[in-house]
Image: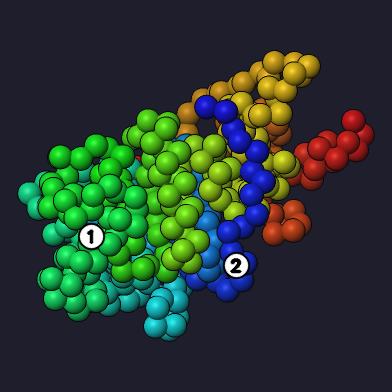
Amino acid sequence: MTLPTPTQPPTTQPSEVLLAVNNLKTYFHTDDGVVKSVDGVTFHIKKGETLAVVGESGSGKSVTSLSIMRLIPTPPGRIEDGEILFSGKDGVLKDIVRLPEAEMRRIRGNDISMIFQEPMTSLNPVYTVGDQIAEAVMLHQGKNRRDAMGVATDMLRFVGIPAPEKRVNEYPHQMSGGMRQRVMIAMALSCKPALLIADEPTTALDVTIQAQILDLMRKLQQEVGMSILFITHNLGVVAEMADRVVVMYGGRVVEEGDVVEIFKAPRHPYTMGLLNSVPRPQDREPGQPKARLEAIPGNVPNPLNLPPGCPFEPRCKFAVPECSEAVPPLYDTGGGHTARCIRWHEFEQVQQGVGA
Ligand SMILES: Nc1ncnc2c1ncn2[C@@H]1O[C@H](COP(=O)(O)OP(=O)(O)OP(=O)(O)O)[C@@H](O)[C@H]1O
């Protein structure tokens, strides 16, 4: 995979905050100890924007999104602290962490929808795709079955499924992986959510279909005007889809900022490592030396046994003794860009050519 250069302007002019996650802590109480999967995570999503959450496997991306949906398996999981402020279609600001379950059920699928990597885990094999979309429409929009089936057919057409009148009566197994992912998107968008959470939605698809689904999501976002929280480990997808990016490591945000800025001037060695492990288009230009790709050495830390200091320190080629003393705070590096590294300023100087 080659990394595209993120250049596209935001699809809308995002201004107001739709969702604000503040100091979220979601832990799992296991027999082996407490897994601090999400440990003090803060970020926000503006109306109409796409925010990518990126990080290696185990960094806490999915637990963050499941916390927003309040779908953490309890026990062993629990949201221990923090707030998730959300302003839904009714315009009332709510804290998702503290909402009664009945109200949360109204929000799920109506104000916030989620699509997953593998549609077969979310689609029911014994019902037609039309029935499944119609059910969500009947539940949230109070439509009768006939009208809801009409909406289901329209939604299948909307997501580019050919012959929707026929396919609405088909079962998931009669469709290809790409078509099933389109059905998932149709179902997720059928109630026009304000926020779509997409957790690795294209990972299981081959590259051509992947590109089609990403294109489709961009187009639909413009038409529906929703915000997207895009969970991925794929920086190519981040560059193509996101306005801003949150980089997670060991259950914490280690860097956040505008996607163009982060790709151009990362301030955290983990983000630099992620970027160095994927080819960039400028490295492939004629006359340029062949880019050296480097995998980040080592593995993500064991969440039951995190080091006392910066969790990336054991893998970091820029680590100094102070790094292992305490978890660094998130430093404001300017222009809405933050990084959790005590040496961020030195990277800035090198990138700006100071003392080089
Ligand atoms: N039900 C659970 N019980 C115990 N630990 C859990 C549970 N669910 C998640 N975890 C732990 O929480 C941490 C974060 O997991 P999470 O699934 O959020 O990572 P991720 O960044 O989404 O990874 P991936 O890209 O593989 O989905 C991991 O260490 C994981 O083992």
Question: Where 180 falls versus 190 (above or below)?
Answer: above
Quarter of the image for the C terminus: give it.
Answer: top right
Q: Secondary structure at mark 2?
A: loop
In this rendering, which labeled residue sits more in front, label 1 or label 2? 1
| Structural distance between the alpha carbons of marks 1 and 2 | 31 Å
Residue named by callout 2: 14
Across and down, in percent, residue 318 comes to 70, 31
Image location (x, y in percent) of residue 349: 84, 41
* Residue 116 horizontal/vertical position (percent): 32, 48
Q: Where does ligand 1 appear, by image quarter?
A: top left
From the viewer's perspective, is 160 left or right of 239?
A: left
Residue at image point 20% right, 66% down: 150
How would you rate the neighbour count of disc 2 (Cα within 10 Å): few for under 14, some for 14-19, many for 20 or more?
some
**Residue 95, quarter of picture:** bottom left
Residue 303 falls in image quadrant: top left
View extreme (left): residue: 126
Residue 64 in view here:
no
Q: Which residue is mark 1?
A: 153
Q: Is residue 314 left or right of residue 260?
A: left
